[in-house]
Image (cartoon, helix red, strand yellow):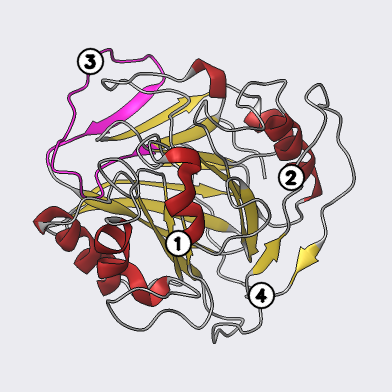
Amino acid sequence: MRLFGPGLTLLLAFALAACAPRQIATPNQLPSDTVAIASPTDTVEPTSTPSTTPEEELLFAVIGDFGQAGDQEQAVADLVKSWDVDFILTTGDNNYPDGAADSIDTNIGQYYHEYIGNYTGKFGEGGEINRFFPSLGNHDWIAEGAEPYLDYFTLPGNERYYEISWYPVHLFVLDSDPQEQDGVGLSSAQAAWLQLALAASSDPWNLVIMHHPTFSSGMHGSSDWMQWPYAQWGADVVLAGHDHLYERLVEDGLLYLTNGLGGNPARYDFVNILPESQFRYNAQHGALRVQATSESIRFEFIDTYGEVVDQVTLAAGHMSQ
């Protein structure tokens, strides 16, 4: 589904053929100058699946810049768990301050262990299947080779960038950090992988997730090395973090959401307001609550007081706030 321009009438339909998540293997290497669309990747089925019915819509949460144990992270975790989500997606910086092995369970497992597959930490039982899909942030990369992160999680493919199909959404999790060995520029192997993977997707909604925002009015600003032609390749939404704020932007008809209010106590100011920016918020911490059917997907940013701060719905070719 392609989305062009805000403000049109919302069309809602709640017919959903729900199915289990499908983890899709990620190629470890592609030629650095390859951008042509290639064949689909192989699929790997999980050993067990959540209980769903065809009438149910998919419900998931997005948190970002969250991994600093304390009251703020606890408040966001309590908020997310109150929604009884199918899974949790992160926009990076999962383990402050330096991605270390001795802090990762305290910063992540303490709050979200029940969603983590193959969990071996000290805070309780893990998930029967993995329902926690993180992306690498710059703080996760401070540890050499991001090894504590890679050891802690069990993710598809090379685990640094990967895809998950959980109908009706298809997640494409990128590693936007310049330390990524397969590159972060438009001519990189990672970009070539994304182009072919998006082309192979048959799910209604294609979401691209990373840490560094393509466009941002915050302190860190826009990340030009991640300004890839996502809409042209088939993406419907791009999600990021890094700036500790919430921002909704639209560029060339494509929705960009920055969500970095997941738990780090420091909240950032808006520094240089971009013309693409449509909504900005940094007053409280919070998370994105996302509801998806085959016909529509709704994003709500909700603060830790339970207030819906912003909402946007995409449906069958258009966008409504």
Q: Quadrant of residue 242?
A: top left
Q: Earlier in the sequence, mark 1 or mark 3?
A: 1
Q: Is residue 25 left or right of residue 257?
A: right
Residue 242 higher or lower than 54, as above or below: above
Q: CA distance from mark 1 to mark 2?
A: 19 Å
4 and 2 marks in contact (CB < 8 Å):
no
Q: CA distance from mark 1 to mark 4?
A: 33 Å
Q: Quadrant of residue 80?
A: bottom left
**Residue type, mark 3 in image:** Val
Q: Examine the residues drawn in magenta and state their main secondary structure.
A: loop
Q: Residues within 10 Å of mark 2 (few under 14, many from 20)?
A: some
**Residue type, mark 2 in image:** Asn
Residue wearing tag 4 = 17
**Residue type, mark 1 in image:** Tyr
Q: CA distance from mark 4 to mark 2?
A: 32 Å
Given this view, does label 4 or label 3 mark the residue nearer the observer? Answer: 3
Q: Nearer the viewer, residue 294 or 123?
A: 123
Q: Nearer the viewer, residue 107 or 169?
A: 107
Does the magenta run of residues contain 278?
yes
Element marked by disc 4? loop
Q: CA distance from mark 3 to mark 2?
A: 38 Å
Tell me the residue at 25%/31% (across/down): 280
Q: Which residues are drawn in magenta?
A: 258-283
Q: Nearer the viewer, residue 212 or 149?
A: 149
Does the magenta run of residues contain 12?
no
Quadrant location of the C terminus?
A: top left
Residue wearing tag 2 = 28
Residue wearing tag 1 = 152
Dot label at residue 271: 3
Dot label at residue 118: none
